[in-house]
């Protein structure tokens, strides 16, 4: 399964991505978690010690690797570089091991996509994503930047599932509607809308009604949970701090739903 977790900033997609990755790993899957969000908070949410995570160089900032694989160093003027760099060994070499044997790969962000100096980095990241999404047999969970435009058409089509996280606010719903439209335009079939931080039936009803206006339906619901804030203040991964909390139980159900959907797809 290749799972992209998307949504408006602050909706809780990193928390969901991290705990999904840990839960899949606890089920015995080989899991690669990819941090493609500029905030780069996935290591913390997974429970990777800061002494390790602080030494990670995002691939987009690893100029030596980019030059080695593409033939051009970021910032060089007029360089010729490879559009198909070798990437098959990058996930193994540059990922770090986290709790439950979840491996983390920090992609980083092409900060000025389209500019000449960043093209070698862009080429490497695109080739790596393409390789992982097409050839990898593991579970891949990607914590992505808000929206999908930065990934481009070829990469988006590689995902089996897009988890579109939405919280009870008009701004979040609007972002969800735009993401779903883009994903459908790119023929992504499995789009799961996940309501998060929902405090009560009134907020649930608000989400359902606003989504219905756009012919969308809430697939999964994760309740607001004080344990999320408590875990963050104590600097402990949620799944370790409160393994049977309401939010973890809901993410567990979401994981089971993904497994059922994946099995149905395979049997068709």
Image (cartoon, rainbow, N blue to C red):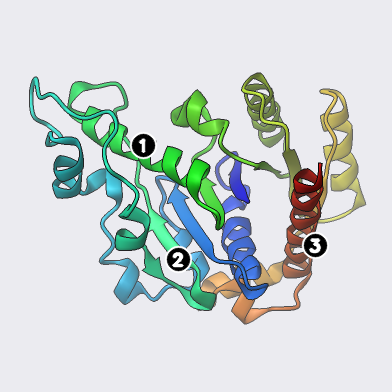
State which mark lies toward you, 2 or 3: 2
Residue extending furthest toward the front: 267
Residue at (55%, 66%) from the top-left corner?
Answer: 30
Query: Measured along the vertical axis of the image, is residue 210 above or below residue 231?
Result: above
Badge 3 is on which residue?
A: 253
Percent across and percent down for residue 130 are 44, 38
Percent across and percent down for residue 245 are 75, 74
Q: Quadrant of residue 184?
A: top right
Q: In what element is the residue under mark 1?
A: helix
Which quarter of the rendering shows the C terminus? top right
State which mark lies toward you, 3 or 1: 1
Q: Is residue 235 visible?
A: no
Q: Which of the two discs, 1 and 2, labels the residue nearer the N terminus?
A: 2
State which mark lies toward you, 1 or 2: 1
Residue at (50%, 74%) from the top-left corner?
Answer: 101
Number of disc labels: 3
Badge 1 is on which residue?
A: 127
Which residue is nearer to you in this view: 12 or 75? 75
Q: Is residue 121 visible?
A: yes
Q: In what element is the residue under mark 2?
A: strand
Disc 3/disc 1 C-alpha distance (Å) = 33 Å
Query: Measured along the vertical axis of the image, is residue 176 above or below residue 129?
Result: above
Which residue is nearer to you in this view: 125 or 214? 125
Percent across and percent down for residue 5 are 60, 46
Q: Which of the two discs, 2 and 3, labels the residue nearer the N terminus?
A: 2
Query: Measured along the vertical axis of the image, is residue 232 above or below residue 147?
Result: below
Q: Which of the two discs, 3 and 1, labels the residue nearer the N terminus?
A: 1
Disc 1/disc 2 C-alpha distance (Å) = 19 Å
């Amino acid at each position: 399964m290749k799972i992209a977790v998307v949504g408006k900033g602050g909706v809780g997609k990193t928390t969901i991505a991290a705990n999904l990755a840990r839960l899949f790993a606890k089920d015995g899957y080989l899991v690669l978690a990819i941090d493609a969000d500029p905030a780069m908070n996935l290591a913390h949410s997974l429970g990777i010690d800061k002494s390790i995570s602080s030494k990670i160089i995002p691939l987009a900032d690893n100029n030596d690797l980019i030059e080695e694989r593409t033939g051009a160093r970021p910032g060089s003027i007029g360089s010729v570089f490879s559009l198909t760099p070798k990437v098959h060994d990058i996930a193994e070499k540059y990922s770090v091991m986290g709790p439950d044997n979840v491996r983390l790969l920090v992609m980083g962000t092409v900060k000025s996509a389209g500019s000449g100096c960043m093209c070698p980095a862009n080429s490497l990241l695109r080739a790596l994503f393409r390789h992982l999404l097409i050839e990898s047999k593991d579970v891949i969970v990607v914590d992505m930047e808000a929206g999908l435009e930065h990934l481009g058409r070829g990469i988006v089509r590689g995902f089996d599932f897009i988890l579109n996280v939405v919280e009870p606010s008009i701004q979040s719903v609007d972002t969800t509607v735009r993401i779903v439209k883009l994903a459908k335009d790119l023929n992504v079939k499995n789009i799961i809308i996940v309501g998060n931080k929902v405090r009560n039936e009134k907020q649930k009803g608000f989400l359902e009604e606003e989504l219905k206006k756009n012919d969308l339906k809430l697939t999964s619901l994760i309740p607001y949970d004080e344990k999320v804030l408590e875990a963050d203040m104590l600097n402990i991964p949620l799944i370790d701090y409160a393994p049977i909390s309401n939010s973890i139980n809901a993410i567990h159900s979401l994981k089971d739903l993904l497994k059922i959907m994946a099995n149905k797809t395979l049997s068709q």
